[in-house]
Each structure stands twice: as structure tokens, then as C-alpha cells.
Amino acid sequence: MSHDPPKEPHGFATRAIHAGQDADPTTGATVVPIYATSTFTQEAPGSHKGYEYSRSGNPTRAALETCLASLEGAERALAFASGLAASTAVLSTLRPGDELVASADLYGGTYRLLERVFRPMGVVARYTEASDPASFEALTTPKTKLVWIETPTNPLLQILDVREIARVAHEAGAVLAVDNTFASPYVQRPIGLGADLVVHSTTKYIGGHSDVVGGAVMGPRSLLEPIQFYQNAAGGVPGPFDAWLTLRGLKTLALRMERHNANALELATWLESRGEIERVYYPGLASHPGHALAGRQMDGYGGMISIRLRGGGPAATRFLKATRLFSLAESLGGVESLISHPATMTHASIPVEVRAARGVDDGLVRLSVGVEDVRDLRADLAQALERLSE
């Protein structure tokens, strides 16, 4: 199936500030107000001004959804209370007996959702250890209804060919959903590459300040209709203040991503020269197997880096405890730099033997590179690496 994104008259940074954010018609407020109301007064039964109850729709949330759709080149967007709520809404379109094909390298919360929530309901997920389109094609069957990918993947930063995997999905009669959280819509727009649905944890780069949790699904109206029904029926929506915070974060997304990209590329290049590190995973490096593909389908390489330390788990533990500017914390994509241990944090819900076989072992460390002065970030990582030899 093919969906042409709507034509946009303005550039990305302009739309991030203005799309869906006209001055308030009642007061002239330049910034979208926080409509802190649970319900809306109606003129008569069934006669209202577009809103009835804030679970079904709220003007602040509508402004966020309009802006997100514009930035992803989608017909429409739906906002949710978290990234996993957004993922659940997409997966809710599947029925018992339906199958899903996914890359094995994916967020631990998504794996938990597929295996412990939807598999008991009769939805079968099949995982490919390889990232090439042929490996996805080999797993599709007449029962395949959805193909789910991340690119770059979490946490090994694999780059998947969206255009070719979209072809595989469509030839199988399936929908392609892309979790675009690691890239952000500034760096990558999967719908323009042939994807049907795009999912985000807006908690990450879109919100950008580690102060609000949220999620979103973008795509054509036809595919979003059942997802919108689920959004209203299940009720996993963001409140107006959360929507407002996320919308405020969007205004600086272009500026922040430029700095995230630049800082991460400089740090990844430097980290590759350090003897304490066995491997650096970053698509901006020429040594990355997906470097050329990333250059074709991304505008920049993102702010996420993973590294494998030569000393394995013990070295990783010492390193994680030694950083000062890089905070040891879950999540990613905020203005501040974070460091995490996927095996015990973001991917702990995946059985140890499964994640170890996929390369998510105790020696793997993930960096979310923030927008601080890159010299300070480099100095922080250098002193932490030097502690490994003490």
C-alpha cells in the first residue's frame, strides 16, 4: 500500500513552531493554552464546538497531534500517555491467529508487550536475528498482518532498510510500522520511505527535556481509524499539561537534534580510538555496517551511541559508576546526557539467554549524548575510562 505524505509549504523548524499552533481565537494567546478541563459545555445534545470530553479530544492535545503529523509527513497523528501505550494501540488492531514479524534487536518493553501481553492473546511474533529485508521476507506467511521495526535499533544501533522492508511487508499484505524514537522526525521520516505507521515515545527526543512521558502514532487516516477507536475506548491519553509540555519541546527539536548529532559523531569518533573499548556502535562511523544506508535514509545519525567494553561486565559496572555528567538513568533523548546498562535496565525484561545471544550482554553500555559542551562530555568519559585501569 502506498500513502503519499501531504505537501508542506514550510520547512521543518518552522512547522515545529507553528503547525497546529495558531493564536488562540478567543484571547489571541500566541502559545497554545493548556485546556485544563475534563468536559465541555454543549449548546444542545449533540451540538458542540468539536469537543465533548477530554478523553475523546482536547484542544491542547489536538494541537500536538497536528504538529506531529506535519513533522512526520503523515495525514494524521494520535497522542498517547506513553510510548508503550502508543505501541499497544497499534498492536490492538491484531486478532488471535495474526502474526507479526519484527527485528530481534528491539526495545525490551516492546518485547515484553509482544511476549507477555499479546502472545497469550493469540498474536504470534516472529523475530529475525538479521536486519536485511530477505530475512523479514523469509518469516512472512499468509497470516502476517504487521511488520514492526526500529531503525536505528535499540540498543545495537542497526540500520534497517525502510524502503525495502516496506516492499516486503506490502507484498505480504501486511502493514509496516516503524518505531522512529531513536531517530526523531528531524533525522528520519519513515512514511516518506514507504512505511505505513510511525510510532514514537515522545518522552524522548520530541519532548526533549526528561520532564514528560508520552507517545504517538502517525499515519494515514484509514489506518488510524481503528487505532483512534482504541485510543478513546481504552483511554490511554495524555493530559493537557503533558501535551503542552511535549508541544513546547517540539519547538526546539530541530536545534536540539543538530547539537545531538554533532556531539554524538564527535564522541563516537573519539571513542573508537580508545583501547578500553572493544567496539563502538554508531551509524555515523564509516566502520558501521549500516553507514551508507543511514546516509541515504537519514538526515544525520542521531544522538545514541552504544559501546562494548573490553573488560566485560565488571568494567561496565566501574565505568557506569564513574561518569559525572552522564547520569546513570533510564530513558534517552533529553538535553542532558544519560548513560545506561541495557542488560539490567532497558532490556531486563528480555530473558538473559535471549538478550545475550543477541549481543545485549553485561559489557554493553548505551549513551544518550546530550547538548552540553562536547569538550566536557569527552572529558567526563575520558576520566571514567581511565578509572578502569586503577
Image: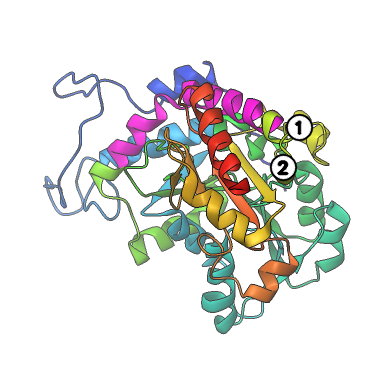
Using the rendered view, name the quadrant where residue 249 is placed: top left
Q: Is residue 39 left or right of residue 196?
A: left
**Residue position for label 1:** 285
Instruction: Check disc 1 and give the amino acid type.
Output: Leu
Residue 326's place in the image compared with 223, above or below, is above
Mark 2 or 1, nearer chain start: 2
Q: Is residue 184 left or right of residue 178?
A: left
For the record, the magenta segment spans 243-269
Query: Magenta-highlighted stretch: main secondary structure?
Result: helix
Residue 1's place in the image compared with 246, above or below, is below
Q: Is residue 124 left or right of residue 216?
A: right
Alpha-carbon distance for marks 2 and 1? Answer: 9 Å
Q: Is residue 69 left or right of residue 389?
A: left
Depth check: give the residue in front, 377 or 321.
Answer: 321
Instruction: Point out which mark residue 332 bears.
Output: none
The reply to whether the magenta stretch includes residue 252 is yes
**Residue position for label 2:** 280
Instruction: Confirm or deny contact between disc 2 and disc 1 (CB under 8 A).
Output: yes
